[in-house]
Every structure is written in C-alpha cells, then in structure tokens.
C-alpha cells in the first residue's frame, strides 16, 4: 500500500533545533503528503531536552502547509533510564545519539507501521515518498551504505552492507518481532564502540535492505539525483588531514567552504524564522 502520510523521527537535545528547522523546511518544500514528525528527547544528567517552545513553533509551522501535519515532542527519559547504554555514555556524541535505539519502547511510535529516522543535519531536495514506501516485507530496516565504513565493516559475508545510521527507515513491527533494537541497546550497555549507535544497529539488524546512495548522500556536495543530503563530517587530506564539519544552518560556511547556493531559498526562510525558534 502506498502511504500518503509519512512518519518522520528526529532525536536529540535542545541543540538540534536549528538543524531540525532547516530539515523540516526542506521537507515541506518537496513533500505534499501529511507529515507526522516526532522528536525524541531526554532530560537526564545535564542534557537539555528539546524545548516545548521549539516544538510548538515547529508544529504551527508545518500546519500552515497542511492542518493534518504535526510536530510532537516525546520525552523518552524513562525508557532511556530503564536500560542505560552505560559503556557509551561519555563518547564523542551526546547520549541522545542513541535514542533511536529505543523507538520500539515508546508507545506513540511502537504502534506505527514504519518511521523514517533522519539526523538533524539532513536536508531534503526531492520527493521522499518512493523511499518511504519501499517494500519492507520481512525487513527490519532500510538504509544506505556508509561512505567510509562500507570498506572496513562487513556483517553478511564479504559484501558491503555497513549502513550509515543518519537516514534509516524502520519497519517497527518487524523490529519488535525480532528484538533487534533491544539487542542494540544491550550492546551499547555492555561494550564501548566507535560510533556506538551506528555500530550497534549494524550488529543487531540482520534483515536489512540497502537503498541507493541518493537517499543519504554523505559527500560534501549533493549529486544530480540526490534526494536527501546528509551534512555528515567529511575527512579532508589536503593540504593537511582534518575533519570538515559544516552543518546546514551554518549559512556562511555553506557558501564559503562548500560553495553551495541551491539551498538559499530554504536558508532565507530559516534566517527569518530562527529567532522565533
């Protein structure tokens, strides 16, 4: 069945608000079905949760396009505390990076058929409905190869199947049936891992579907067919090795470093709205 409404998930603390605003503006530009947007957050040991003010603002924003759209904040503190990812709580990334591993335990989400998780630094540049509606029969999650890890990590023989966790389409009933997300949480609780959430998902998900690169372009610039552009960190080797970090709300860096102007209409709207966020 082809869904005309889509469930979208972001996870994070108060710091993701600017990125989520840009990401939502880009979704509204290209996707005209109903958008049910969930933001999972926690209030735990100094982590500042995604604010009610930002949630109300974003909810009002998406309803201007379609009154059936909504943005809903979910406080997942209780489920997070019930089984902490203890060995990875002080990694390079915040504990919120592991919240998507708990989506099967949150009532508002666990009752859904599927949900598309996106990092806060993912910008849409086309209709995502074909991706969202891909056949997930017998599949726990669909994702896209990680541009760096695909050459180093293998989970099913020697074929490339290591997924980037920044864009993932979850078949929630299948995940609940297999217990793969619970397995991922246990891995994060018992074993320190580089990129803990991504490593845990790749280890725990056995029934996966690899999708074309255009649905999670991790390079610094989009390709002609790119639908979702992920502003992930990129390694640079000339004239010296460094990690290049440019986020979609950093307008000056996007122009000066990446030389990208195609998002200017979205960023102009962002610039006008950010103070109200």
Image (cartoon, rainbow, N blue to C red):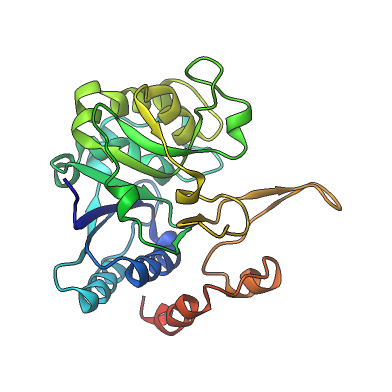
Residue 68 location, x and y as percent? Answer: 14, 68
Q: In this view, does 97 lie to the left or right of 194?
A: left
Q: Where, quadrant-wise, is the C terminus in this rendering?
A: bottom left
Q: Which residue is drawn at 22% across and 79% down?
A: 64
Pick the residue in front: 159 or 20: 159
Q: Is residue 43 left or right of residue 106?
A: right
Residue 103 placement (x, y as % from top left): 26, 40
Residue at (18% x, 32% y) in the render: 173
Residue 259 lies, with reference to residue 205, above or below; the image says below
Q: How many marks are shown on the rendered structure? A: 0
Q: Can residue 153 be seen in this view?
A: yes
Q: Of residues 113 and 248, which is closer to you in this image?
A: 113
Give the vertical position of 46 relative to 28 (above or below).
above
Instruction: Please report the residue visible at 45 percent of the width from the left and 57 percent of the height from the top.
Output: 227
Residue 108 in picture, x, y percent from top left? 15, 47
Left/right placement of residue 101 relative to residue 2 reads right
Q: In this view, does 39 lie above or below 63?
A: above
From this view, report whether residue 171 is shown above or below residue 213. above
Q: Quadrant of residue 221?
A: bottom right
């Amino acid at each position: 069945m082809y869904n005309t409404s889509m469930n979208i998930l972001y996870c994070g603390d108060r710091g993701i608000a600017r990125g989520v605003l840009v990401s939502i503006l880009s979704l509204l530009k290209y996707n005209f079905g109903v958008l049910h947007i969930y933001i999972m957050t926690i209030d735990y040991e100094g982590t500042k949760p995604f604010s009610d003010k930002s949630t109300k603002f974003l909810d009002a924003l998406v309803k201007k396009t379609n009154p059936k759209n909504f943005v809903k904040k979910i406080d997942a503190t209780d489920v997070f505390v019930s089984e902490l990812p203890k060995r990875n709580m002080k990694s390079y990334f915040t504990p919120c990076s592991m919240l998507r591993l708990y989506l099967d335990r949150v009532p508002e989400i666990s009752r859904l058929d599927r949900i598309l998780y996106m990092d806060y630094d993912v910008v849409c540049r086309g209709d995502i409905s074909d991706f969202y509606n891909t056949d997930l029969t017998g599949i726990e999650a669909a994702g896209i190869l990680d541009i760096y890890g695909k050459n180093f990590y293998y989970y099913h023989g020697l074929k490339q199947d290591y997924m980037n966790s920044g864009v993932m389409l979850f078949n929630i009933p299948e995940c609940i049936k297999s217990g793969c997300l619970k397995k991922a949480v246990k891995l994060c609780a018992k074993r320190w891992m580089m990129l803990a959430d991504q490593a845990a998902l790749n280890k725990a998900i056995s029934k996966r579907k690899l999708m074309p690169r255009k649905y999670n372009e991790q390079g610094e610039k989009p390709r002609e067919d790119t639908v979702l552009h992920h502003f992930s960190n990129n390694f640079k080797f000339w004239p010296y090795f460094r990690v290049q970090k440019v986020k979609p709300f950093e307008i000056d860096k996007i122009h000066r470093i990446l030389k990208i102007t195609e998002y200017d209409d979205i960023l102009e709207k962002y610039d006008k709205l950010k103070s109200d966020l």
